[in-house]
């Protein structure tokens, strides 16, 4: 890192405009090296990665002195380029000395398209359909996959291998679309704006990430009519529906691969003459084929095949278009960084054509602006691909802070994302503390770890002590406050608001504890959901940091009238926070004067201006 007084990419005195820019923007870059350094020349070096690795060296103009510092400036014209620019500087002295600064990332995106704002403004609720709500015990007879159904909603999911050494995930609890429909008033009361469903299409496993038939709602969940009814009822309550699209791989048990002959269609495993055969790569037909991460039950698909592309997004009757027309409002793309960029672009185009305000959200676990997957720099958020991404960097940084890390590190991690992401992707990020792929957040915060130093049997039977629950609940309240106050869509994994616990899959996928919810947590989440719905600044306001040191994190959304501030003290002693205006705490109704205020340990405030009615 260079001296921040020489160059700071996040300071408007050195770089204008801030962060990512739309193509066609001229970016002004300024160096302020110390006069005592004796530098007589500055050179800007720009490397256009997506333009055949084009490289430019531009002389910087000396524009005078700023106190005891020389000022060199240059303009970088992005033209019609879309992609990453890596830029650096070289300072040269008359005595031949050289100093290099950088490289720095500049994200240049296609700003020609308006991205729907609704997703990032509202609260998202992730539903694992089999475990959320059932209205009766279903009969699995005749359903694909050799399923079993738990009679009691309160039983434990199976996790031990069968006689063949496999954990087959064929045990179901019978959650259904009718059950979700029944609980729509509960979800709306929680402040939910968007329902994000883990896969709902027919599949042999309870997680349904090995799709059996994209054209069919899993019969244990209901029918297409049930899906249409659910979407219609959700829309009437002001909620939208986002579906999980798993297009990188399918099920061994599927109408396309049909590894066990469950389907009447001739699948790729039955005959090389099958229309689906070209979708897969066999090293030895029919028993050796590419699969997702080597898992035989999830055959990988060749997304370059024209017939597969037409089926998923190209044809007017394609899967993407069909389910949007049936009532869905967007898609979340499973393992988006394992889908080719042009495949995602095709999905994006089809989605917008079918429904003008449909959104596409990608699953990416890292900074999605500079992600390299399979040797290729991805175009996820350069425009025309994903409108937003799952924000694992947010989750990781916030969990680290709640478990003891310095608030400064959370701020730095988020500033890296804000600087690298186009504004549409920053505001449409799917923020969360937990998902179906992570341990339950209450357990993680209460225990302080993932339990992997113990056996799986131990993790299965583990239940938090009362002391661990108190610690987890206190930390989760703070984390949820930050989650709901931050730019992007606060996303709640079903049951986190009810105090569900558990380590990794399947212990993070237990059934919702209807009638046994943690009342304290539920009230906290409900209040936060109401704030997100009523306080405009939380939906659209820009972010300003107020304090990020040690165990205290504070920031403001919006400016002037209607501004909202969030402040949390995750430490074990009182800390002083400077409040920008006389405030009222949304969570308790208490009032606080402007200026230095003592924030008690393990306490969070969500503050509105005391002189404004909300």
Image: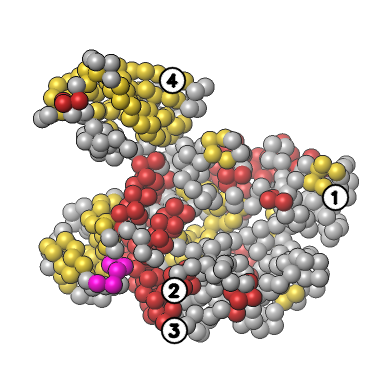
Report which residue position mark 2 lands on: 446
Image check: 296 left or right of 69? right
Residue 59 - label: none
Vertical side of 146 occupied by 75: above or below: above
Mark 2 and mark 3 lie on one chain; the one further toward the N terminus is: 2
Q: CA distance from mark 3 to mark 1?
A: 51 Å
Image check: 390 left or right of 260? left
Q: CA distance from mark 3 to mark 4?
A: 60 Å
Expressed as whole percent of the image width and height from the top left, the position of residue 273 reads 88, 42
Expressed as whole percent of the image width and height from the top left, the position of residue 276 reads 80, 45
Q: CA distance from mark 4 to mark 2?
A: 51 Å
Residue 466 - label: 3
Report which residue position mark 1 lands on: 287
Foreground label between 2 and 1: 2
Q: Give the dominant element type of the magenta stretch: helix, strand or loop.
A: loop
Q: Residue at x 61, y 67 (%)?
A: 505
Image marks 3 and 4: residues in contact by CB distance under 8 Å: no
Q: Secondary structure at mark 3?
A: helix
Q: Quadrant of the C terminus?
A: bottom left
Q: Nearer the viewer, residue 449 or 331?
A: 449
Q: CA distance from mark 2 to mark 1?
A: 45 Å
């Amino acid at each position: 890192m260079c001296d921040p007084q020489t160059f700071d990419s996040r300071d408007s005195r050195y770089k204008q405009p801030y962060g990512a820019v739309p193509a066609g923007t001229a970016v002004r870059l300024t160096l302020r090296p110390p006069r005592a350094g004796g530098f007589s020349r500055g050179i800007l070096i720009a490397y256009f990665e997506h333009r055949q690795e084009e490289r430019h060296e531009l002389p910087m103009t000396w524009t005078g002195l700023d106190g005891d510092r020389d000022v060199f400036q240059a303009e970088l014209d992005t033209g019609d380029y879309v992609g990453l620019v890596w830029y650096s500087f070289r300072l040269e002295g008359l005595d031949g000395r050289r100093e290099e600064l950088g490289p720095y990332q500049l994200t240049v995106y296609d700003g020609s398209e308006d991205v729907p704002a609704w997703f990032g403004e509202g609260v998202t609720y992730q539903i694992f359909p089999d475990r959320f709500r059932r209205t009766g015990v279903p009969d699995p007879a005749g359903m694909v996959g050799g399923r079993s159904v738990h009679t009691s909603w309160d039983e434990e999911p199976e996790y031990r291998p069968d006689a063949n050494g496999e954990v087959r995930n064929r045990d179901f609890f019978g959650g259904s679309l009718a059950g979700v429909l029944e609980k729509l008033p509960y979800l709306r009361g929680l402040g939910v704006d968007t329902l994000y469903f883990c896969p709902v299409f027919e599949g042999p496993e309870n997680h349904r990430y090995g799709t059996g038939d994209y054209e069919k709602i899993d019969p244990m969940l209901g029918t297409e009519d049930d899906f249409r009814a659910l979407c219609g009822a959700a829309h009437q309550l002001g909620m939208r529906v986002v579906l999980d699209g798993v297009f990188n791989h399918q099920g061994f048990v599927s109408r396309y691969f049909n590894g066990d002959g469950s389907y009447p269609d001739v699948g790729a495993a039955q005959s090389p003459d099958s229309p689906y055969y070209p979708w897969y790569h066999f090293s030895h037909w029919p028993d050796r084929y590419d699969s997702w991460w080597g898992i035989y039950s999830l055959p990988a698909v060749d997304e370059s095949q024209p017939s597969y592309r037409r089926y998923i997004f190209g044809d007017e009757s394609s899967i993407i278009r069909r389910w949007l027309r049936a009532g869905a409002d967007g898609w979340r793309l499973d393992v988006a960084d394992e889908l080719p960029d042009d495949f995602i672009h095709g999905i994006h185009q089809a989605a917008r054509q079918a429904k003008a305000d449909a959104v596409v959200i990608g699953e990416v676990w890292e900074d999605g602006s500079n992600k390299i997957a399979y040797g290729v720099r991805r175009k996820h958020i350069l425009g025309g691909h994903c409108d937003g991404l799952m924000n694992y960097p947010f989750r990781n940084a916030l969990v680290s802070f709640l478990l003891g890390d310095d608030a400064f590190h959370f701020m730095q991690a988020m500033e890296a994302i804000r600087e690298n992401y186009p504004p549409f992707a920053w505001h449409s990020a799917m923020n969360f503390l937990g998902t179906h792929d992570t341990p339950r957040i209450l357990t993680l915060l209460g225990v302080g770890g993932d339990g992997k130093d113990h056996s799986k049997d131990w993790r299965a039977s583990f239940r938090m002590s009362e002391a661990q629950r108190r610690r987890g609940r206190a930390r989760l309240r703070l984390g949820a406050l930050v989650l709901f106050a931050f730019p992007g869509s606060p996303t709640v994994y079903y049951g986190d608001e009810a105090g569900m616990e558990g380590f990794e899959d399947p212990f993070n996928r237990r059934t919702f504890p209807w009638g046994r919810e943690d009342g304290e947590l539920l009230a906290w989440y409900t209040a936060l959901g109401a704030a997100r719905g009523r306080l405009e600044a939380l939906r659209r306001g820009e972010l300003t940091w107020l304090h990020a040191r040690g165990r205290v994190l504070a920031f403001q959304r919006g400016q002037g009238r209607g501004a909202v501030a969030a402040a949390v003290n995750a430490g074990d002693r009182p800390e002083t926070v400077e409040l920008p205006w006389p405030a009222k705490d949304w969570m308790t109704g208490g009032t606080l004067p402007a200026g230095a205020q003592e924030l008690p340990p393990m306490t969070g405030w969500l503050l509105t201006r005391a002189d404004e009615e909300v």
